Amino acid sequence: MLLAALALLCPQSEPVPPPPSLVNPGPATAKDGQMRRPNIIYIMADDLGWGDLSVQGQKKFGTPRLDQMAAEGLRFTSHYSGSTVCAPSRAVLMTGKHTGHVAVRGNREYKPLGQFPLPAAEVTVAELLKSVGYETAVIGKWGMGPPGTEGAPLQQGFDHSFGYNCQRNAHFFYRDFLFRDDEKIEIDPEQWTHE
């Protein structure tokens, strides 16, 4: 199973009113009674079915951390992917556009490493969240533009990124590199083991 997690983290140091441009999920108050912005962790998983998590009733193995997050947070139980393939699904999620209107409509390869870049003119959810004070990160598969292009995560509103920049590389269980922000991180193949 390949996971892609969109983790958007909010510093909790100073009280702020709820941002008018975002949906207010309800009161989130600290001990001092001040309103705080909620932390947002959005998990998008490739090839994960409705019944694959124990929170959904699956009994063959446990998913306790995800179950805890589901119990303590907001669950989307009628959520559909924006496309049947990787890059357009992420582009729809990032921009809020219908597949027919978003620039990334397929897993079009971009040489030497990556997929067709999301144009700079596209406004992403990360950019909107940053505009109201959130710190943003994307972890896992990106597939909407390699480092050095307008579609790279750091050019699309993310403060941090880690994982597979090219989704094609995520098709293999063990890789010899990942990306941290725009830096290629070499991984020693000897560290991988099933033991």
Image: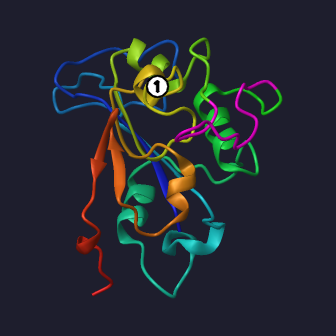
Verify whether residue 176 appears in magenta: no
Taking 192 as reference, is 70 above or below it? above
Which of the pair 102/108 is nearer the observer? Answer: 108
Asked if one can make out residue 23 in the rendered structure from this viewpoint, the answer is no
Span highlighted in magenta in the image: 101-116
What residue is shown at x 44% (from left), y 20% (from top)? Answer: 155
Image location (x, y in percent) of residue 115: 61, 38
Image location (x, y in percent) of residue 48: 60, 65
Kind of residue indicated by mark 1: Ala
In the image: residue 49, left or right of residue 150? right
Verify whether residue 108 appears in magenta: yes
Q: Main secondary structure of the magenta part?
A: loop
Asked if one can make out residue 34 in the rendered structure from this viewpoint, the answer is yes
Residue 12, by quadrant, is: top left
Question: Which color scheme did the rendering employ for the protein?
Answer: rainbow
Image location (x, y in percent) of residue 33: 22, 25
Taking 177 as reference, is 183 above or below it? above
Which of the pair 75/148 is nearer the observer? Answer: 148
Residue that extends furthest to the front in the rendered view of this protein: 112
In the image: residue 55, left or right of residue 92? left
Q: Residue under label 1, please give it.
A: 126
